[in-house]
Image (cartoon, rainbow, N blue to C red):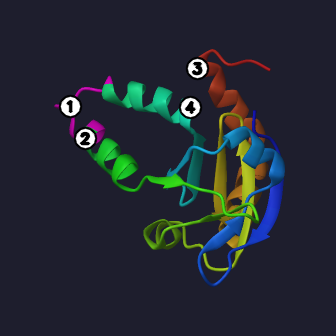
């Protein structure tokens, strides 16, 4: 399980250090792709395979399913660690998430997310203000604390 929030910087070559405990859980074979809300999602290979199966089950005749599948898979890149524990983020993914220098890396249960620091702070602040309301709406999905 991925938990926590960390601050790291991207270097001029597009490499970023991922926290050691996240690296250990991601293993040597992982996927980086476009996420929601202008961040990147990083999945261990096993979790990615499960997500792929769920997306394959979506109706191919539905325009939203096709669009989502195309954007998620076309943006995906296989990740690889260098000797310093960094991953090189492709230009198209850095551009998508507006990653320039300062980043926030968060653990979200089954995946890691990489955010532009300012974007994460704005998103987090707005979400914290409505945390109770968000939790109340999850009751519709039979979710309880």
Secondary structure category for the residue under label 1: loop
Quarter holding the C terminus? Answer: top right
Secondary structure category for the residue under label 2: helix
Q: Mark 2 points at which residue?
A: 66
Residue 58 is a magenta residue: yes
- Place residue 62 in its image quadrant: top left
Where residue 2 appears, as percent x and y from the top left, is 75, 39
How far apart marks 1 and 3 lie (CA) works out to 25 Å
Q: Earlier in the sequence, mark 4 or mark 2?
A: 4
How crowded is the residue under tag 2: few (<14 C-alpha within 10 Å), some, or many (20+)? some
- Place residue 52 in its image quadrant: top left
Q: Earlier in the sequence, mark 2 or mark 1?
A: 1
Q: Which of marks 3 and 2 is in front?
A: 2
Q: Residue 48 vs residue 73: left or right?
A: right
Nearer-the-camera pick, 123 or 75: 75
Q: Which of marks 1 and 3 is nearer the N terminus?
A: 1
Q: Mark 4 points at which residue?
A: 47
Q: Which of marks 4 and 2 is in front?
A: 4
How far apart marks 4 and 2 lie (CA) works out to 21 Å
Q: What stretch is highlighted in magenta?
A: 57-65
Q: Mark 1 points at which residue?
A: 60
Where residue 129 appears, as percent x and y from the top left, is 77, 51
- Residue 141 - label: 3
Residue 132 is a magenta residue: no
Nearer-the-camera pick, 8 or 134: 8
């Amino acid at each position: 399980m991925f938990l926590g929030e960390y601050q790291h910087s991207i270097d001029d070559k597009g490499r970023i250090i991922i926290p050691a405990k996240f690296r250990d859980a991601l293993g040597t074979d992982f996927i980086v792709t476009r996420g929601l809300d202008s961040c990147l999602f990083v999945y261990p290979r096993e979790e990615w395979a499960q997500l792929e199966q769920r997306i394959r089950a979506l109706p191919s005749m539905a325009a939203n399913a096709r669009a989502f599948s195309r954007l998620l898979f076309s943006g995906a890149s296989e990740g690889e660690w260098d000797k310093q524990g960094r991953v090189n983020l492709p230009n198209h993914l850095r551009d998508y998430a507006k990653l320039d220098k300062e980043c926030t890396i968060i653990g979200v249960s089954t995946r890691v997310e990489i955010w532009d620091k300012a974007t994460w702070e704005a998103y987090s602040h707005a979400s914290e203000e409505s945390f109770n309301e968000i939790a109340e709406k999850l009751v519709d999905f039979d979710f309880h604390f």
